[in-house]
Every structure is written in C-alpha cells, then in structure tokens.
Amino acid sequence: MSKMEKIRVSSCCNREAIPSMIPAFPKPSQVRKPQEAVKVHPDGRQVCNLKTVAGKDEYDSRRYQMVRRQRFLCAICGLLKIFLFFDHEAGRGHNAAHRDDRLLHEDGRWKNAALCATCNSLKGSKRYHWCDGKYIPVDNRFR
C-alpha cells in the first residue's frame, strides 16, 4: 500500500476513523521555533537575521534610513548615488562575529554608514568610524 492511499479503518458506525499510528502532536525535533527578525545581544548589539523575510526587510529599512540620513551621499567620496550599500564600522573581516546593525551608538552618535559600490570595494575590510560628521579610517597604530 502506498503512502498516498487513504487508510480505511472500520468502526462501529461504518465511518472512516483516524488511524492510531498518526501522533496527535509533532515530535519536539519537528517543531520549528519562529526566528526573530532582529537579535539583540546582551552587550547591546543588534543583528538583523537575513534568513527571514522580516529580517531582510528590517535590514533594508535600516539601510534606507542611513541613506536618507546621509542625503543619498556616499560617506567616503561624497558623491550623490541612488543605491548605497550598508557598511559596518567593524567590517566583516575584523571580528565579524560581533557584527552590529544599529544606526546609532548608545550616546546618539552615528554608527554605520552607507557607501557607494566603488568606495565599498576599495575600503575592503579597513575599519572606519564617524568623527565630526566625516567617515574616516581608524588608525590602529596607537591602540
């Protein structure tokens, strides 16, 4: 008998009954927990979950807020661009496990930036930060 065929179980009323082999509840390993769109870590970092639709939407929303905040200007070259990329202060090459998708620091300073494709690729994994309204490289020699 194939799996697609209905299993008929006779009962006293000549009606189809539910086979007793089907469990009433799924096994715990089969239950999927809903994934949150933004995970907030104990140290305050916020990371958008790009595996969910809600997480991607939140990430795009934050990128658009950054672009509007910068008036559609690239943070490095200052050119007017329609599409800008989300750039993290601490790039993925530097401690990528500590990615932070927040737009502002706790004290209200700007955190991440929006860059054009050219500046984003030329920047690579160098660290940049906001200082007096400019997105400048971090000098690691004096750390």
Image (spheres, grey):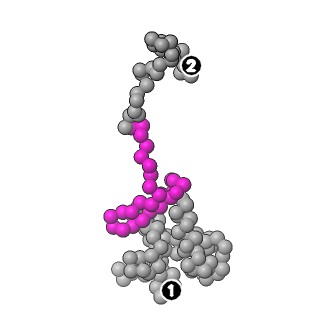
Q: Secondary structure at mark 2?
A: loop
Q: Where is residue 62 drawn, in percent x and y?
A: 53, 69
Decide if residue 47 is on the left or right side of residue 117. left
Q: Decide: few, some or many residues near mark 1? Use Cα within 10 Å; few <14, some 14-19, many ≥20.
A: few
Disc 2 versus disc 1: nearer the observer: 2
Closest to the observer, 105 or 139: 105
Q: Which image quarter is the C terminus in?
A: bottom left
Give the tally of numbered discs.
2
Decide if residue 2 is on the left or right side of residue 35. right
Q: Residue furthest front?
A: 13
Q: Where is residue 103 drawn, in percent x and y?
A: 47, 73
Decide if residue 10 is on the left or right side of residue 82. left
Residue 1 falls within the magenta-colored stretch? no
Q: Residue at x 43, y 25 (%)?
A: 22
Q: Is residue 90 above or below residue 107?
A: above
Q: Is residue 87 above or below residue 50?
A: below
Q: Decide: few, some or many residues near mark 2? Use Cα within 10 Å; few <14, some 14-19, many ≥20.
A: few
Q: Where is residue 102 drawn, in percent x and y?
A: 45, 70
Q: Which residue is mark 1?
A: 133
Q: Is residue 30 above or below residue 103?
A: above
Q: Residue furthest bottom?
A: 132
What is the magenta range?
A: 29-55
Closest to the observer, 129 or 20: 20
Residue 5, numbered label: 2
Is residue 34 visible in the rendered structure shown here?
yes
Q: Which image quarter is the N terminus in?
A: top right
Q: Residue at x 62, y 78 (%)?
A: 72
User: Marks 2 and 1, how far apart in space?
Assistant: 68 Å
Mark closest to the chain's N terminus, 2 or 1? 2
Amino acid type, mark 1: Gly
